[in-house]
Amino acid sequence: MAEIIGRQLNCDVNRKRMQRLMRIMGIQAIYPKPNTSKGNADHKIYPYLLRDVAIKHPNQVWSCDITYVPLEGGFAYLVAVIDWYSRLVLSWRLSNTMTSDFCIEALEEALSLGKPEIFNTDQGSQFTSNEFTKILLSSGIAVSMDGKGRALDNIFIERLWRSVKYEDIYIRGYRRIPEADTGLARYFNFYNVERPHQSLDYMTPREVHYAA
C-alpha cells in the first residue's frame, strides 16, 4: 500500500513511515483482526473476584492476557503475566498459534518467581482449559475471570498492551517472529527496569515490586 501511494504521489514512501503517519493521524487499516478471546462452552468459567478489591501489595493479584502482534503477511500471538500492584511483567511468550501451550509456559515461568493470591484472566479457551486452571488450583491460587465482554475487568494488562503496541510494536514494524521475539525481549526489559510509570509515582515496576 505504501509503495502504491508513493507512486501515485511521485515520491518515496516506505512502509514504516506510512505506519508512523497513520498513527499520528489516528488512521487504521481496515482488515480483520484475530479474536484472541474465543471461549469453549465445555470449560468451567470462574467468577470475577476483583470488583471493589483494593490492591495493596505485590503478588496479591496477577493477570494474564493474549494480544496479537501484526507481522508481514499475518499475526503472532503475545501472552503476558503481570502483577497488578507493581505492573511488573513477570513473564511473556510469543507464538504463531493460539493453543494453550505458550500460555502455560508463561504461567509456569511466572510461578517460578512467586505466587499470587488471585489470578485473573478473560474467558478465552486457553485460560479456561483444565490444563491451565489445574496449575493455579493445585498451587492454592484463587481463579478469577472477567465478565464476558468486560475488557475493563483486566484494565492493567489492557494498559500494558497499549504501551507495548504504541511504544514498540507499531514503531518497529516487525516482519517475522524471531525479529519480534528479540525486539519484545528488549522492550519488556526496558518496561520493567527503566521506564518510570506515572501511576507508580515515577518508579519502575521492578523497583515497586521488590521494594514493597
Image: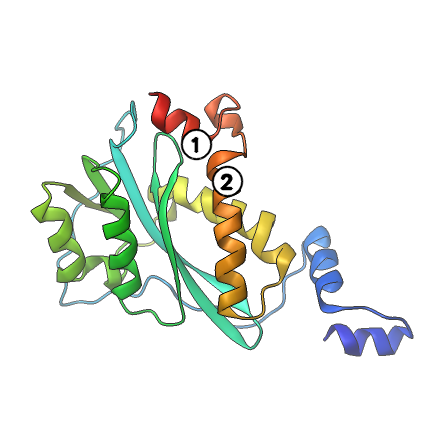
The location of residue 55, given as percent across then percent down, is 30, 26
Q: Amino acid at mark 1?
A: Pro
Q: Secondary structure at mark 2?
A: helix
Marks 2 and 1 in Cβ contact (< 8 Å): yes
The location of residue 80, given as percent across then percent down, is 37, 51
Residue ranking furthest to the right: 10
Q: Is residue 176 visible?
A: yes
State the image quarter where residue 72 is shown.
bottom right
Closest to the observer: 82 or 152? 82
Name the disc covering residue 191, or none: 2
The location of residue 125, given as percent across then percent down, is 24, 64
Q: Residues within 10 Å of mark 1 (few under 14, many from 20)?
A: many
Closest to the observer: 169 or 211? 211
Residue on which the image places disc 1: 205
Q: Is residue 146 visible?
A: no
Q: Residues within 10 Å of mark 2 (few under 14, many from 20)?
A: many
Location of the N terminus (image quadrant) = bottom right
In three-dimensional space, the C-alpha distance between marks 2 and 1, rounded to whole angstroms, equals 8 Å
At x 47% / y 42%, what residue is drawn? 159
Closest to the observer: 78 or 37? 78
